[in-house]
Amino acid sequence: MAKGSGADTIIAKGVEMNGELRVDGNIFIDGDVKGTVISQGDLNIGSEAKIEANLQAKNAIVAGVLRGTVEIAEKLEILETAEITGDITAGVLSVAGGATINGTIRMGVGISE
């Protein structure tokens, strides 16, 4: 993933976070998150992640369980281990065989700032 303008943030396996997280850089999540995650950089959701949140990022890769609204300005890559329940907006979408998506998908439109 490309580097954002800020430092990288890591929420590791075993870490639980509730609330709103806003960062200028990139985020890697492999823990449990509830709330809102907004990144000016890239978002990487690992295969161990369990997320109930609304997400906004420049680019994202999803491999874990995600429930919520997803708004990605550029490219969203959904890997084969991903389970997404919620609405998705992305400029470009890539979905691997085996991934599960339940919700609406809008492509080719920008996200709200």
Image (cartoon, helix red, strand yellow):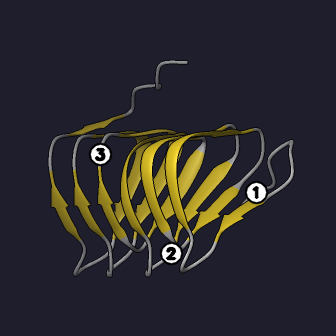
The quadrant holding residue 95 is: bottom left
For disc 3, the neighbor class at 10 Å (few under 14, some 14 to 19, many from 20) is some
Vertical order, 81 against 104 (above or below): below
Q: Position of residue 61 (x, y in %)?
A: 50, 63
The residue at 76%/57% (across/down) is 2
Which of the two discs, 2 and 1, sits closer to the camera? 2
What residue would you read off at disc 3?
Answer: 68
Crowdedness near tag 2: few (<14), some (14–19) or many (≥20) residues, C-alpha within 10 Å: many
The secondary structure type at the circle numbered 1 is: loop
Closer to the camera: disc 1 or disc 3?
A: 3
Q: Is 63 placed left or right of 31 in the picture? A: left
Position of the N terminus by quadrant: bottom right
User: Closest to the observer: 97 or 85?
Assistant: 85
Percent position of residue 21, x then y:
61, 42
Image quadrant assignment for residue 5: top right
Check disc 1 and give the amino acid type.
Ala
Residue placed under numbered mark 1 in the picture:
2
* Residue 7 vs residue 91, the one in the foreground: 7
Please identify the quarter of the rendering in which residue 96 is found. Answer: bottom left
Give the labeled residue for mark 2. Answer: 46
Above or below: residue 10 compared with residue 59? below
Total marks in image: 3
Question: How far apart, in angstroms, are the residues tagged by discs 2 and 1?
Answer: 17 Å
- Residue in the picture at 29% in, 45% down: 68
Do residues under tags 2 and 3 come within 8 Å of each other at their CB atoms? no
Q: Are marks 1 and 3 in contact (CB under 8 Å)?
A: no
Residue drawn at x 79%, y 58% as measured from the top left: 8
